[in-house]
Image (cartoon, grey):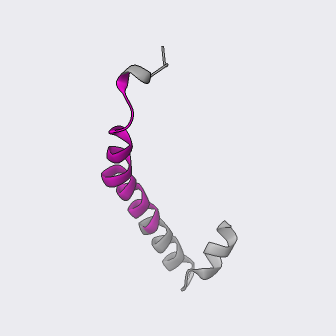
Amino acid sequence: MYAALWKIIPGPLWVRILIAVVAAAAVVAALMMYVFPWVDAYISPKDVTVK
C-alpha cells in the first residue's frame, strides 16, 4: 500500500518527502478538527474504563 502511494507521488525524493509530510499533516488536522469532535458527541465520559 505505502509503496504504491510512494510511486504515485511525483518528483524527486525531497519533493516526495515534502508532499508526504504535508499530506500527513492534513490528515491529522482533519482528524482533530472534524472527526474527533464528531465522535466525542457519541461517547459518554461514563463509558471510560481506564483506571
> Is 42 inside the magenta-drawn segment?
yes
* Quarter of the picture holding the N terminus: bottom right
Lateral position of residue 39 relative to residue 50, left or right: left
Q: Residue furthest front?
A: 42
Q: Residue furthest top?
A: 51
**Residue at 48% across, 13% down:** 51
Residue sitting nearer the eye, 48 or 2 = 48
**Residue at 33% across, 54% down:** 34
Give the quarter of the image for residue 29.
bottom left
Residue sitting nearer the eye, 15 or 33 = 33
Lateral position of residue 16 relative to residue 43, left or right: right
**Residue at 64% across, 79% down:** 7
- Residue interval drawn in magenta: 23-45
> Is 51 inside the magenta-drawn segment?
no
- Say above or below: 28 vs 12: above
Residue 38 percent across, percent down from the top left: 34, 47
